[in-house]
Image (tube, coloured by chain):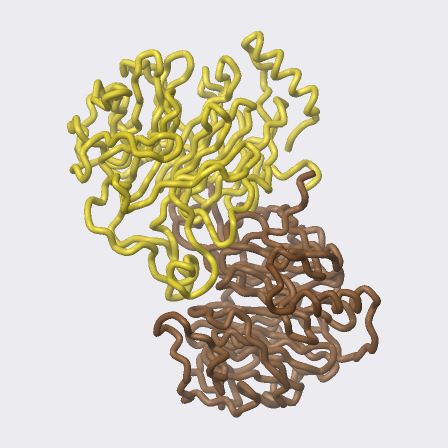
Chain colours: A yellow, B brown
Amino acid sequence: MRLTVGRVAAALLVGLTAGCGGIEDGQVPTFEVDAFWPMPLDYPNILGPVSGLTVAPDGNVLIVTRQDGFSRANEVNVVTETGTCCSPTKAVVEYAPDGSLVREWGEPNQDYPWPNRPHAIAVDPDGNIWIGGGVATAGRGGRGGRGGRGGGAARPGPTVDSHILKFSREGQHLMTIGGVGETPSNQNANGFGGAAGFSFDAGANEVFVADGYANNRVAVLDMSTGELKRSWGAYGNAPDDADQEPYDAGAAPAQQFRTVTCAELSDDGLVYVCDRGNNRIQVFQTDGTFVSEAVLAPATLGSGSVGDIAFSPDRDQHFLYVADGMNERVAILVRSSLEFQTSFGVGGRYPGHFRQLGSVAVDADGNVYTAENGQGRRVQKFVNLGNGMITAEHQGALYPGDKR
Amino acid sequence: MNRNRNLIIGGSLVVAIALLGVGQATLEGVALSQTVRAPIFEIDPFWPKPLPNGWVYGTVIGVTVDAQDHVYIVHRGVQGAEAGADQNPPLAECCSSAPPVLEFDADGNMVRAWGGPSETEEYVWPASNHGLGVDQMGNIWIGGNGGGDSHVLKFSQQGDYLGTYGEPRNAPNSSATNHFGRVADIEFDFAANESYFADGYANKRVAIVDIDSGEIKRTWGAYGNTPDDSYQYVGERRGGTGWSADDYEEQQFRTPVHCAEPSNDGLVYVCDRPNNRVQVFQADGTYVREAYYAPETLGDGAIWDIAFSPDPEQSFIYVADGKNARIRIIDRQSMEEVSTIGTGGRYAGMFQAVHSIDTDSQGNIYATETYEGRRLHKFIYQGIGDAARHQGATWPSRN
């Protein structure tokens, strides 16, 4: 429930607080879902599982989608020549702030090694696009209905994407970082284990790689050469390749990351790491010195509660948004204390609902974007209505006020 | 919708004008960008309201609207990680599978939730529930398309068990008089006290059942032929491209027979889903006519469910085409397609496998999705107007 803070008053408040570096105690950003963003793609095009999301400095929204998740029996009927709908878009889709399609590009069988399972997309300080990968389980694809078969044809080659791709904004291949088809290892200086997130330090010319789905480290690369400069594991420990016991909320804190799905650099020089499978955020200095941690929804099993992180756009980056895909909601934390404030979203397939929420991003106006992987397959926009007092621990679906 | 057989002569001026416009605009060769006169709709993305209790929908494989414009759906629930809160131990706080039958009021509030296997074995819940109808008493009838689903269940509006039509757990047999073969949908002719079963996923017939006694009064197959389970289809459905159902005039329905809808004027419209055609009959099974839509559609086929517009003449038929991700708007008299609504996708007004459809007294359309769509949509009727040949996602203007 959103309490009574009008748009105008809230906007003033945001402006004031941004200037003096503080947010009134207890206030959090409030939102409503925009059910009509982005604009529909032309028939018969549809999005696949959305496995990466970012907002470019110019405010355009970029996603990367997987093309291995479609049901051939009843979804990509143009491909199978059984009907007139539907057909997958290319893997990378760029939207303007108004939700109109700017361009789409990226697919297998080009002159670059497209990942088996592309994951994560980011724009570096030069305006170039970085794309990572994930772990593809052999033979898996989208579920159909009765008798539905998996999506893409069986592909030879590695099941873990060990490389990173760099493109121009328009989709021209610029660079491949890391060997293709490497066996994942935290000791490998020339390959990654499903690079699942990127952030950039323009001053140091470094990129922080969430590495990843198969590895359990943060890898710091030279942004120009792609050379591995340093890496670290949980608490700043040396990352190791040892097998891990299943997550147990009652056990002592794991001394290694489980699944590293984000590594986000804040403006004040801290790196926020999503240790997804351990349901925790760990914070580091850029040299890997451990600073603090917070556990979110510690009873969560499955793939875990901390999938992706984004910062609010105020000068202090006062708030932290966490995409919690198992509980299907976006958690709002105060960045300095890592204290949970409230959440929004609920499981389902309607606007403001989530199915396999994987990614979160924020634009310069404080609007929040989310991306759903698996069978969710949407990028959604939540319009920032200004700060207000929220009493609900979990706000649920943020329908417009008169629709709640 | 409640349906009766009162034949009302004459039509409103608006409809008459609309039909004239339709006649002009659907001539062959008219550019797709040209507008047509057609019913116009707008998706309501915030209907129904979010479910309570962390509930989520599974495949929504039936919808019906009662005389009070309450909307009922039947769905199949969710399992595994999607039902994370239902696991032991729970994987997460999300999500829980909603009960199979959900009732909504016109505002989108969920007012009842019930259904599922009988704890006392009083009745046999379908192995795979499929389709529902509401009779003039407000009772809910539920079919099934799983193994052994040779019966139809009847419940009160509150979900109390009332009776079983047909003996459960029989093998399919289009000649059987004591059971059915995976009934896909149920509709009614209240004046004749008859229920129309689309029978179904295993049988190849329409079965007309006395509402009170449960007796099968008559059945028929395609073109009014005697249903024949041994029929060899002429057309090869999966042999490559270029297959067109209307080249063959298959003499039997091709399972599933997915709907059987009586109109006000004594006709019955049958969804012969994978044959991509609607066949029209008199109530005694006399064949009247047929029409094919997207005849080259393979796989699941193009004709999934039918609803009539609620004007006295039932001027329009709305056809859910799950394979091509559209609702087809058909002029009922000419059987010509006038316009379509919907497109492929996961956003409001878009479809992944639109499956079931009904209308309310105001002309609004309710449509559900199976497979991975898993929603109940409401399209708000805006009246007859200038429409695009394909209306797409029917979003409101953003001005």
Image position of A172 with respect to B251: above or below:
above
Q: Is residue B374 visible?
A: no
| Residue at the farthest front position | B29
Percent x, y of residue B306: 61, 70
| Left or right side of B323 for A164 | left
Question: Image point 17% across, 29% down: which residue?
Answer: A190
Question: Image point 56% across, 83% down: which residue?
Answer: B206
| Left or right side of B93 for B45 | right
Image position of A27 with respect to B335: above or below:
above
Image position of A71 with respect to A110: above or below:
below
| Residue at the farthest top position | A20
| Left or right side of B209 for B91 | left
| Left or right side of B127 for A342 | right
Q: Quadrant of the N terminus of chain A?
A: top right
Q: Of residues B68 and A102, which is closer to you in this image?
A: A102
Total number of numbered labels? 0
In terms of image quadrants, where is residue A371?
top left
| Residue at the farthest bottom position | B226
Q: Of residues B8 and B79, which is closer to you in this image?
A: B8
Percent x, y of residue B253: 50, 82
In terms of image quadrants, where is residue B223?
bottom right
Percent x, y of residue A304: 37, 37
